[in-house]
Amino acid sequence: MALCFASCSGKAGAPLDLVAGLEMPERVQLGKTIYPLVTVGNKVQGYDVSEGFRVKTSINGVIWQDVRIYSAPPKDKFDKLGKDKGWTPVARGNYTFEVHVDSTGSLTGQNRENNRYTKVIIVE
């Protein structure tokens, strides 16, 4: 897949820099549904990602959400995914959530250092 720089104007630009994140409480009550918000940020401007990229979220290593995104958010902004997808813990303990942006490596020139975000929550 080719990645267009500077809105496909043909001008060179810095590498794409997508950032993974997750908004959710650190402690959750057993049986209570929560709505984790996966965030995808962008540190640069002017890229065409119309062919898309994948954002995968896993819980304890099991895929919970796998979404294809067809546009990057504007520079220094975040898109939020999963507003309608709830998760209800069925057992007490620690759960590791991991978000992986561009999980298939389809975007070339991508800074991959911040493409993963991990958060451990406690179910009480």
Image (cartoon, helix red, strand yellow):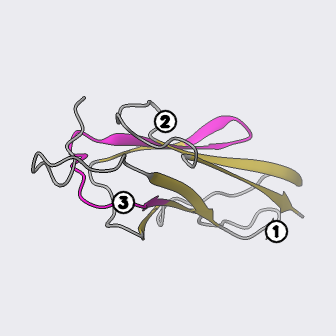
Q: Which residue is depicted at the point 69% across and 58% down? A: 88
- Judge the density around disc 3: few (<14), some (14-19), many (≥20) Cα neighbours within 10 Å: some
| Magenta span contains residue 38 | no
> Magenta residues, as a range?
40-64
Counting residues from the start of the chain, the first of labels 2 and 1 encountered is 1
| Callout 3 amino acid | Val
Using the image, tell me which numbered label, if any, was put on residue 116: none
Q: Which residue is mark 1?
A: 29
Viewer-side residue, 72 vs 83: 72
| Callout 2 amino acid | Ser
Using the image, tell me which numbered label, if any, was put on residue 44: 3
| The C terminus, quarter of image | bottom right
Element class at badge 2: loop
Q: Which residue is depicted at the point 58% across and 44% down? A: 113
Relative image position of residue 86 (x, y in whole percent): 58, 60
Q: Which residue is mark 2?
A: 103
